[in-house]
Amino acid sequence: MSKLKLTFGCWNYDRTRALMDGSVQPDGIDLNYLNMPVEETFFRMLRHKEFDVAEMSLSSYSVSMSRDPKPFVAIPVFPSRFFRHSCIYVNAKSGIREAKDLIGKKIGNPEYQMTAPVWIRGILSDHYGVPVDSVTYYTGGEEEPGRSEKIKLDLPPNIKVESIGPDQTLAQMLLDGEIDALYTARMPSSFLNGGGKVKRLFEDYEQVERNYFKETKMFPIMHTVAIRRDVYEANRWVARSMMKALEESQRRTYEDLYETAALKAMLPWLTSHVEQVKREMGEDFWPYGFEKNEQTLRTFLRYHFEQGLSKRLLEPSELFAPESLEAFKI
């Protein structure tokens, strides 16, 4: 019997590479893995639904939950996670020395609905006293002019969002002082090449992020894996098959990271780093599945609702295919 042919749009991650090279194959599926950077995958899936399965921004997916009919259904697999304190960049002459100095300032976000800024705004509100509606947000291309929101938004009036000019970029505006700060996922060129005119808000970000995890036990989720609704409804078993394969691929990566016969990544003290991470975050420091991530998801969905991106406060279990929420036991 022939297998179901599916396309999977996803970047080239260590934790998904076994699906890309074919050494792990989902049960019953002939998988065509399309390796693309996240911006391309998200744009093509959200605008045109080009793929059967795709890595997807957790925020964009949550926005899509308000559509009728819902275009996608996710499984609790999280190919991207990131502590985002390091991703708040400020103009050195803006007068911003600590988080509360952001209040009243002009803040760039490539897209207001991006997952990284959702986490940043929520963390700044919860932990640093910077209300989400205390600044004006400017959206547009970080490095290239003309970027727009991938999903049409309907925000409450207290959220102030303006588009930058058709020839402007946020990276250059930050360097020139036209905006005071930038919340983003990609490191801006003006930080790398700006001669010190752009800096991080949290220069000791690693310790700040370690303290955040110690306090909250949350490793922020950036992306999930979404199945196009029509594919899922025609083949409900696809959710569990893809989840099993992604879990197996990740298991192999956990093993590779702690291999000492020869280093599989070009980091001289990789073994020491892995041991430190395990001490601080546990053996399963990048957890998949619903139960281990429920509190992190609940916090994110609260941020999403408070920031005007969800029409109602979603429950974490609503995000995922029922088949992916539990597994058989012997």
Image (cartoon, grey):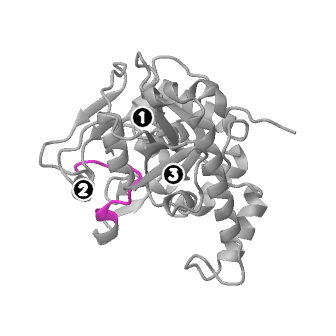
Question: Is residue 189 found inside the magenta-colored segment of the image?
Answer: yes
Q: Quadrant of the rendered structure where residue 89 is? A: bottom left
Where disc 1 sits, the SS reads helix
Whichever of labels 1 and 2 marks the residue nearer the N terminus, that label is 1
Q: Is residue 229 above or below residue 225?
A: above
Q: Do the residues labelled 1 and 2 touch (CB within 8 Å)?
A: no
Q: Which amino acid does label 1 sit on?
A: Ser
From which residue to which does the magenta span run?
A: 178-191
Dot 2 amino acid type: Glu
Residue named by callout 1: 60
Q: Residue at x 54, y 53 (%)?
A: 82
User: Pointer 3 and pointer 1: residues touching (CB < 8 Å)?
Assistant: no
Identify residue for label 2: 143
**Residue at the location (56% across, 36% down)?**
238
* Quadrant of the frame with the C terminus: top right
Q: Which of marks 1 and 2 is in front?
A: 1
